[in-house]
Image: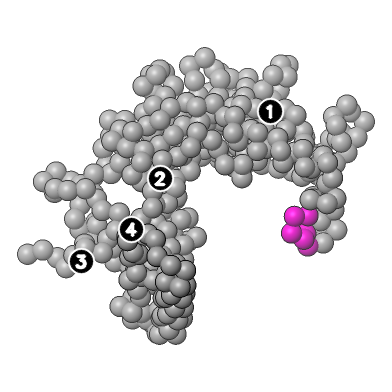
Amino acid sequence: AKYIPFLTRDELRQRKMYVEHIEQSPSPMATRMRWGNAQEATSVLTALNYFCGLNEDTVIREVGMCGAGFDPDVDNSDTNVRDGALLQGLSIGATPDALVCHSDGTVEVLEVKNHCPFVWNKISPHYTGNKGGGGGNRNRNKKKKKLHSNRRRRHQNSRKLNDDIADDYGDGEPAKKFAPKHYLIRDFHLERRIPPVYIPQLMMEILCVGNAVDLDGNAQSSSSSSSDPICKSAVMVRQTATKGAIMLRLNRDEEWITEMQYFLGRFKKEYVDTGIIPEDNFFWESGGERYHKFLERTKELSESVEFVAFIDHQKIQRVVFENGVKGEIPLFLDEVDVEEED
């Protein structure tokens, strides 16, 4: 893309002050969520740059909520749809991050995942580990384990103590000046696979975009006589902070989608309609062999996705400092001076 966003020193200071306020009581999950939200546009841009580099007529389009490719108000019990009665009254939808619209008229779902480089330091904010050469007897190892345990216990106690201290802003959060450094950087090269937990999300998005796409009147719509869906695949961009990005493609699997709809229908019938709170692993026993095969197929799909491309870290287009400001934008803001320069 030709547009290059810049960041000023003043904006970096403002960012640090904002983060200091919202991160007074650190939460790993909240940090991952904020990282993903902040980096989503960068990952979409990575996909745009890649696909447009192959064909300049490719377009990345914004998209909102997409409904599933079947009418939930139609009685499916008399059709040849497998377990169609379970779909009665089932309304489902999905929201992809974007759509990849190719020049040949095909459409792919685009889903981006940004892997947060920050991990919780579970031992101690001041413990760096021992890089010794190994060896030693069992008693020395027991002493190390005990020391390790004591460090962890003191760290947990220090976190509890911090939670009991009123903060500088008066909103009941721990004071920032007492908070230890909880995070470390851990980034890694990504495998050529999509984690199984994301397969349902991608398949649902493929289903919901399906044959209901009508872009500028050029693509087939749900009223088309053709039963062949226009969306037959999804592209996932898995992007890291320092190790580049990997792009993978998951192809539409009709049998898997049918099974997904079946278990969604069962969930609605057995839990939603009855108001019963589901237990853990609610289909593990009652779902029987059918459910176990469904899980196995999910794992197979995750490991058999199509490799599209690896994007080197240097080729990922990110926000840069304004002209005249040297250095890279840091991942940690600890050393950023919030005081105005003279």
Quadrant the C terminus occupies: bottom left
- Read off the residue under disc 2: 188
Instruction: Name the disc covering residue 253, or none.
Output: 1
Amino acid under disc 3: Val
Amino acid under disc 2: Phe
Which of discs 1 and 4 lies nearer the camera? The answer is 4
Q: Nearer the viewer, residue 49 or 221?
A: 49
Instruction: Name the disc covering residue 338, or none.
Output: 3
Earlier sequence position, callout 4 versus callout 3: 4
Is residue 171 visible in the rendered image? The answer is no
Q: Nearer the viewer, residue 9 or 152?
A: 152
Earlier sequence position, callout 2 versus callout 3: 2
Residue 70: quadrant of the picture: top right
State yes or no: residue 281 in magenta: yes
Magenta-colored span: 277-282
- Are dots 4 and 2 in contact, CB under 8 Å? no
Crowd band around label 2 with a 10 angstrom C-alpha radius: few (<14), some (14–19), many (20+):
few
Amino acid under disc 1: Asp
Amino acid under disc 4: Gly
Q: Residue at x 14, y 43 (%)?
A: 323
User: CA–CA distance between discs 1 and 4?
Assistant: 51 Å
- Read off the residue under disc 4: 133
Q: Residue at x 45, y 39 (%)?
A: 190
Q: Is residue 204 left or right of residue 174?
A: right
Which of discs 2 and 3 lies nearer the camera? The answer is 2
Which of discs 1 and 3 lies nearer the camera? The answer is 1
Earlier sequence position, callout 1 versus callout 4: 4
Q: Residue at x 29, y 58 (%)?
A: 332
Secondary element at tag 1: loop
